[in-house]
Image (cartoon, helix red, strand yellow):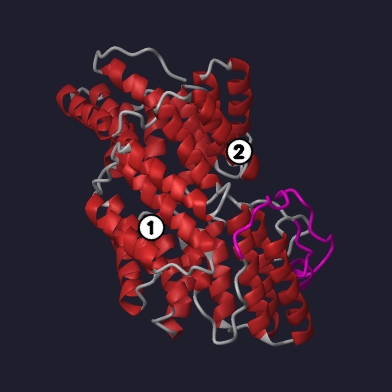
Amino acid sequence: MQSKERRPTRAAAPMALAALLWTLPLACNKAEPPTPPKETAAPAAESAPKGGSARTLALQKPAGNPLVDREIEALQKVADKAGDKADPWILLGRAWIKKARESADPGYYLNASACADTVLGFEPKSRPARDLRGLVLVEQHAFADALDLAEQILIEDPDDLMALGTKSDALLELGRFDEAVKSAQRMVDLKPNLPSYARAAHLRWLQGDLDAAKSIYRQAMDARDPRDPEPHAWVLVNAAKVFWHEGDIEGADRGFERALGVLSDYPAALVGRARVALAQNDPKRAAELAERAYKKSPLPLHAWVLGDARKAAGDEKGAEEAYALVLKGRSTDPRTVALFLAVKGKDADEALALARKELGVRRDIYTRDTLAWALYRKGQIADARVESEAAIALGTKDASLLYHAGAIRIAAGDSEGGEKLVREALKTNPHFDPTGAAEAKKLLGEETHGAP
């Protein structure tokens, strides 16, 4: 991929896993990973060299965390001298991915993609380069393209672990759950390690099997590489989310805290603790944590949590400023913006348009839930019910999904079935979302004091 301007890719999917696979070994020597970063990286808006080729973008001078940057710069020197030798460029691409993950700046995936393109320029059939490109395609939400590429690679080598991971991730986002499970299971069978266990745990959670998900996440933690902290922090965060979704607020907080012990200022852990603080009625602390998360990683979701925290703290102006930041993600993360608008009851037309647009890219349960809630806000109840029933079909224990499905059933005339789902949502996690939880209680005739 060539680019004159480095910019963020589309925001990662809620549980995107493909980038974990860059930790798998190559048939060449692997550079020693750096220790955890302590400083923030350069912002995604930093410009790449103008008018340059893929090679130029791959060799762009990094900025931000000096520990990761030193690794990139060392590999750049080796790759630049290597000419048409593929391995140094692949290692460089994986280092750029490491920087993208540790800095929480998805723009660096463009640099990684440039490394793959450089190799493919002189070795068009290079499987490691195509694997790297497939990983980037998933991060860019080009799921159909990623799936096509992974399947081409797997024809050549059915045991290619990175291609299996890319295939599983792409299939999941495209709504082909059973096929995604098969690819993930093949990964576990071939190599039971952190990337394969992490996929298996997430898939079991989506199926509503919380005990199995927790057990497999523990296996993923045990399989961590102590020299490489970010994948471990990532697994800790997603394991903590299992506790969050079942309403174990203290358990979730311990998990997020452990992740921050592995990587300080890890955005996903910070925003997780912010949601915990909101649930514990400490909006000031929630706002502090969410603001740190947003400064490190300016995603619409982080701005949303920041706005809710500020509103709960009585800072109406600050809340509106944060909510305005959510809307800046229309082009990079339309699903989150669509859900935000639908949840808050704002601009139902735009919410529906964004949700429908996203459905053309991915058909997973969270996209269908977003579309369902946007349709509900527009009063298109029959269509909303079709989408919401699909969203809960796997048995996922997510209170937000359950509440949406319940409210839509009530609106469709199924009061008994709908109220049962709404009660289940509040029992599962009464703090799932300030706005949604307040609406759920009101729908059941329970006392509520309002919400953002």
Magenta segment, prevailing SS (helix, strand or loop): loop
Q: What number is the disc on residue 292?
A: 2
Badge 1 marks a residue whose secondary structure is: helix
Residue 40: in magenta span? yes
Q: What number is the disc on residue 427?
A: none
Kind of residue indicated by mark 2: Arg
Q: In the image, 82: left or right of 16?
A: right
Q: What number is the disc on residue 172?
A: 1
Decide: few, some or many residues near mark 1? Use Cα within 10 Å; few <14, some 14-19, many ≥20: many
Tell me if residue 254 comes above or below residue 59 in the rendering: above
Badge 2 marks a residue whose secondary structure is: helix
Tell me if residue 385 comes above or below residue 2 in the rendering: above
Residue 42: in magenta span? yes
The magenta stretch is 35-63
Nearest the viewer among 89 and 276 is 276
Decide: few, some or many residues near mark 2? Use Cα within 10 Å; few <14, some 14-19, many ≥20: many
